[in-house]
Amino acid sequence: MTDDLLAWRKEFPILESTVYLVSHSLGAMPARAREYLAAYADAWAVRGIRAWEEGWWEMPVRAGDLIGGIIGAAPGEVVMQPNVSVCQSIILSCFDWNGQRNKIVTDDLNFPSNLYVYREMERTGARLVTVHSPDRIAVPTEQLLAAIDEETQLVSVSHVIFRSSYLQDIAAIARRAHEVGARIVADIYHSAGTVPLDVHSLGVDFATGGSVKWLCGGAGAGYLYVRRELWPELKPRITGWVAHKNPFAFDAGAMEYAEDSFRFLNGTPAIPALYAARAGCEIIAEVGVERIRAKSMRQTARLIELAREAGYAVRTPLDACQRGGTVVIDVPRGYEVTEELLRRNFLVDYRPGAGIRAAPHFYTEDQELELLIREIGKCG
């Protein structure tokens, strides 16, 4: 089969020496990321403090626009943050948790970092309701919908579940949340860049994610989308001088929030990470998520077929329409097998209670899927 997406392999140096199937955890570094980081160093070295007025100050929003183009947000609706934990904390700080409407509805397959943040909110009056997954693969949508009621203030779900690659029905969950007057945040970390999505069409109020995975943008560049209509009413308690309406007045009085999405920023942004993130986002936009998804569905189906033929259990939905870009393969001694695969330059990862996670991306060759399953057999 002719695969014109393989022309992009030359953009990713690590593909020359490894079988790289871990983009669900850390996307391969584009060669141009090195160039962009060098440009950051040059700007700092040559322009010094003047660089803030020559692009750095706007970078949290301009870099956010690159993400926005991939997730269906309009210009100015996405701001960059260090990570999703900070994004989630900013969202939670916008609400009062002392009234009757104080429930946070989530599920027990949500990413643990999110759950840690939510549990700590119970100290401020929030009530956490966690819907259980009986098979540790999917969360029953009907049970999530039933848990959302008039006392719910926020619903938090992952678009694609990190442990199993299950693709949740975010639109249905958002409709139910809005029916009872609640808000919804979708963690799109494991979908953006490999599953087409539109935050407006899904109806979410907030979305969080980062560049480190499918977007091939490296660490330290998380992002936060907030529905524009909500901006005037939201006043995050987790804030800082960059979020001020007039930050360079250095007024020590009461906080006056910026009228645009800068109001959801806080302290001085991590500029180097934003330079690095630009490279991957540009490539994903050039390739196109629709094309990435088509290839992903084909390759994940093939990987599942190969794994089952080899006698391994698959802890991922078999229906491609319910599956993100990762395949979870449950093999005996999975952790030890993963360590040996890494030693042999087969880059995957392992999650307890799930198995070996392998993720073909647009730059993956079909033969690499067969090589992986063969190598797992040799390591077992």
Image (cartoon, grey):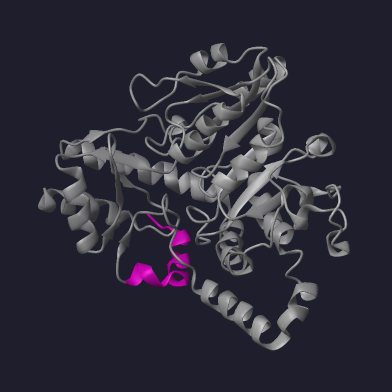
Q: Is residue 175 visible?
A: yes
Q: Residue furthest bottom?
A: 46
Left or right: 225 in relation to 218: right
Q: Is residue 75 visible?
A: no
Residue 149: horizontal and vertical position, in percent?
63, 12
The quadrant holding residue 140 is top left
Residue 268: horizontal and vertical position, in percent?
69, 62
- Reply above or below: 302 against 201: below
The quadrant holding residue 59 is bottom right
- Which residue: 34% across, 26% down? 136
Residue 365: horizontal and vertical position, in percent?
35, 58
- Which residue: 78% across, 48% down? 263
Highlighted range, magenta: 1-16
Looking at the rendered image, the quarter that the N terminus falls into is bottom left
As for residue 192 lying within the magenta part, the answer is: no
- Reply above or below: 313 against 248: above
Towards the viewer: 336 or 87: 87
Total marks in image: 0
- Which residue: 61% across, 45% down? 87
- Reply above or below: 294 against 276: above
Residue 299: horizontal and vertical position, in percent?
37, 46
State whether the magenta stretch is mostly helix, strand or loop. Answer: helix
Towards the viewer: 290 or 42: 42
As for residue 13 lying within the magenta part, the answer is: yes
Left or right: 62 in relation to 171: right
